[in-house]
Amino acid sequence: MEKILDINDLHVSFVTYGGEVQAVRGVDLELYKGETLAIVGESGCGKSVTANSIMRLIPSPPGKIKKGSIHFKGNDMTKLSNKQVRKIRGVDISMIFQDPMTALNPTLTIGNQLTEGLKQHRNISSTQANKQAVDMLKLVGIPNPEERMKQYPHQFSGGMRQRIVIAMALICEPELLIADEPTTALDVTIQAQILQLFQKIQRETGVSIILITHDLGVVAKIADRIAVMYAGKVIETGTRQEIFYRPNHPYTQGLLNSVPRLDQKGEKLIPIAGTPPDLFSPPEGCPFTARCPKAMEVCSRVYPFQTELSGTHAVDCWLQDERAKKYTASP
Amino acid sequence: MARYIMKRFVLMVVTVLIIATLTFFLMNLLPGSPLNEERTTNESVQQNLEAHFNLDEPLIVQYGLYLKSIATFDFGPSIKQPTETVNSLLGRGFPISAELGIWTILVAIVSGIALGVFAALKHNGVIDYIAMTIAVLGISIPNFVLATMLIQELAVNRGIFPAATWSSPAHMVLPILALATGPMAIIARLTRSSMLETLTQDYIKTARAKGLSPVKVVVKHALKNALMPVVTILGTLMAGILTGTFVIEKIFAIPGMGKYFVQSINQRDYPVIMGTTVFYSAFLVFMLFLVDIAYGLLDPRIKLHDEGGG
């Protein structure tokens, strides 16, 4: 399969009055054509920053890509000029944001907002752009698209608005769609509909999707591969089966234990104790050490090497290191 | 929409009527009368004059006559300048005052918004600090102080612009500058803060994610939303500019309406006081109405229905 995105050793920092927040500290990710990659992790772990960095949407200042590369179809996004990036934004890579209630401009008709990307990037007439926008609204399941084009965002419900946001992101037929918590602001029934819509769109257009979420239910439904982030690092990656059935990092195990399950009746949920580390001065070793029930002495001193458990499954944890097996029982 | 306009129109008439009534009784509470002068007039002449201007009638009858004059928009002759009618004074003064007012508003809005937008885009940069220093000075210095300073510096010392009167474009520069600086400063500050807030909105990020150019993001997506608060205070600013014209016209000896307005109060020239007051208030109320309409046009979420007051 063709690799369309390759992130290497990405470091992103925000310089504030209080000091430098190291939001992303060496992320490696790759994405193949037609695949859905989910990035999961709790609030503040750097998943949104990673996603925004791909499109160079980090507000700068204060944000800055300090190190690393983001190769998208051969181009290093971190090195392109602003003008070159604008030709990629919305055309090759599109983004969907968390809250559909605020992601649309309240003073412009949705028709206007849908077609402006097309008019910007493609040399087409207004009638043609309108026709494409109507087709797109049909694809995402908006009834009466012709009339709806003339309406303003406040005349739509939350679920409908998210459909419009999705239509807007897809209108230039991008190869990569980044969805930053696309269902968090929606109620559960609408969530399911939107996820089905993602799957349908992926079947019909072959778009690759990066899904950022903290909702493991969403992940279980549509992700092919999962990357678990913690304190600015990807600590475990694997296919959906590998992460859900054979989680190796104690943090991933903790995440899964804190989600209610239908097959284990009456058991209490086990939350992960403690809070994530302060990213102003991240700890030297594994950032999860302080909360980890299986922490060893080495954990607080040296960040673990990556251990490959299979062709697709890798984890950053000392417990999986050959040398650690001598001291502890396998988890 | 039509119903809304109808309702607003009725409210506007009521507002003007209340202002007119208050002015009428306040005016009559003032000591003295237009015919009460230092020189002694013959008793019968005095009585004839009072009868001529209906000043011998009971107050309530005078009020009725006066309401009639509003309805027909014929305020009769001026008492102090017998060759003039109130309407001829208004007809002569209004175009000049309107010219001053319109230019002032245009200058204030355009430069205020430009200053505010650039300050917001270069947030905490040099341009921002310069713009906000200008704005703070503009708000703090009253227009009559600024006017005299401008005359002293640019007219008397350097002789770049004429010091007074109203005949050529060069004559207009100083009065407009003196009058526009205050409103411009208010608009600039408001635009800046509202623009800063708008730029952090999600839909701005959406627009950027579409690959739109920075100019398009600012002008099409941010500015329209950022200008809502500016439109809201435009009505108040207009009232400020209108009262400002009295002072500025006096300082620069501009033969506008303000001159007659101030003069008429000093001279107790009842018909002119009433005529100018009614005219000014009707004008202002109409401007506020236009501002409300503009607000509805700018923001589709605001519907000009007749519910929710007007």
Image (tube, coloured by chain):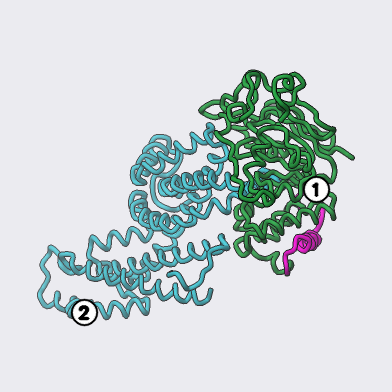
Question: Which quarter of the rendering shows the N terminus of chain A?
Answer: top right
How far separated are the C-alphas under marks 1 and 2?
78 Å
Front residue (pair B96, B126): B126
Question: Left or right: B241 with respect to A220?
Answer: left
Q: Amino acid at mark 1?
A: Pro
| Mark 1 element type | loop
Image height check: is B3 above or below A72?
A: below
What residue is shown at x 56% (from left), y 27% (from top)?
A: A280
Examine the structure image and report whether residue A127 is included in the region drawn in magenta: yes
Q: Which residue reaches farthest right?
A: A1
Label 1: chain? A
Report x, y in % for residue A262: 67, 52
Provide the major secondary structure of the magenta segment: helix
Examine the structure image and report whether residue A137 is included in the region drawn in magenta: yes
Would residue B230 be visible to someone looking at this image?
A: yes
Task: Tell me which chain appears cyan.
Answer: B
What residue is shown at x 73% (from left), y 36% (from top)?
A: A247
Task: Tell me which chain appears green.
Answer: A
Q: Amino acid at mark 2?
A: Ile
Which of the two discs, 1 and 2, sits closer to the camera? 1
Badge 1 density bin: few <14, some 14–19, many ≥20, Cα 10 Å: many
Question: Which quarter of the rendering shows the C terminus of chain A?
Answer: top right
| Mark 2 element type | helix
Image height check: is B262 above or below A2?
A: below
Label 2: chain? B
Q: Are marks 1 and 2 on the same chain?
A: no
Find disc 2 in the rendering and name its residue.
B60
Find disc 1 in the rendering and name its residue.
A174
Magenta span covers which residues? A118-143
Report x, y in % for residue A131: 80, 63
Question: Left or right: B48 with respect to A223?
Answer: left
